[in-house]
Amino acid sequence: MDSQDIDAADDLPLLEVAFHIDQADPSGSRWAAVVRKTYDMIYNGQETGRYRWDQLMKTEKTHFGTLFEINAQREFEFEGGATTDYRIAGHQVDAKWSQTDGGWMLPPEVFGELALVATGSDAESRWSLGLIRVTSEVRREKHNRDKKSQLTAEGRKAIHWLWRDAALRPNVLLQLAPAVVDHIFESRWGTQRTNRLFRAAEGMIVNRNAVATVSRQLDAQKRVRYNGGARSALRPEGYVILSGMYHRDIATALGVPVPLPDEYVSVKVVPTAGPNGAEIDGRRWRRALPGEAVVEPAPILETS
């Protein structure tokens, strides 16, 4: 069957649900936050030190879909459905997550209804969300013991994608080289692990969950601050640790990624007499070049 025969344009309820979702989140940033939150919750890094999908137990991987459904409902306040997870724009919608693109398992109660299918990869910092009407034309005849089946190849082509391979806020521990991450975790002390993280991740976004995962302490964010935290420890080496709460303009001026309110970015800086860079603590500073020697401690940032 040609996927055009099952075109979403012929399904008015599907288009109404798609419109509702788009109106609630035109940029997709809220859905991206739901995916990010679900990964971070399932890793439970502050207690376990885990940060990768392959570190999870099989039961935890299975539970990811349930957490995703719950987090989406809390974020968007969808009504509960009669036989499905949600009622959106007056229509029954069942949410399905699969870590494998196309691997959604569809139970009998969703047959004939709309499925909100989602997938993503933390390692590749991407996620996707789409809608499909689950009919006999788009699902396989074979099913498992729970009578769940998957989409056919033509069914996967017929998905009405709302976002496809959209950007996911990065997990810095998956962006660093494995040997570097191993070095970070080798230390017995949470403060030293935090220092190693910001030293290794210079110029990269580090979210608060990564700090909590590395420090493994309840007061994880204290490990970033001055007065004994990473800002104090790394200052003699020329590092400033910018916060998305207070230093977004400085990040822009230094030419590094701009952190969100719950993110940081460390930058190695040197003083400059030129027009480029940022004014910090009454002087101008620029980002140090790779291998450039630090001639004096980094400036002190305002943090309130």
Image (spheres, rainbow, N blue to C red):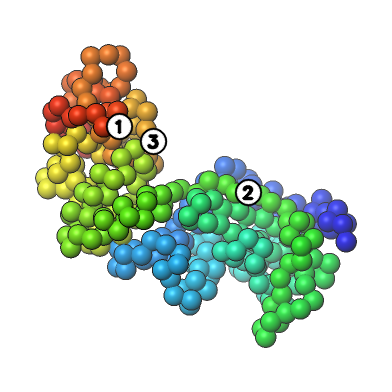
Residue drawn at x 13%, y 28% is 296
Q: Which residue is mark 2?
A: 163
**Mark on residue 158?**
none
Q: Quadrant of residue 280?
A: top left
Q: Is residue 50 above or below residue 194?
A: below
SS class of the residue under badge 3? loop
Numbered disc 2: secondary structure: strand
Confirm whether residue 81 shows in the render. no
* Left/right of residue 10 with respect to residue 125 in the rendered view: right
Of pointers 3 and 1, the one earlier in the residue sequence: 3
Which residue is identified by label 3?
Answer: 258
Q: CA distance from mark 1 to mark 2?
A: 37 Å
Q: Work out which quarter of the rendered image holds the N terminus and state it.
A: bottom right
* Nearer the observer, 29 or 206: 206
* Number of numbered discs on residues: 3
> Given this view, does label 1 or label 2 mark the residue nearer the observer?
1
**N-terminal of the two: label 1 or label 2?**
2
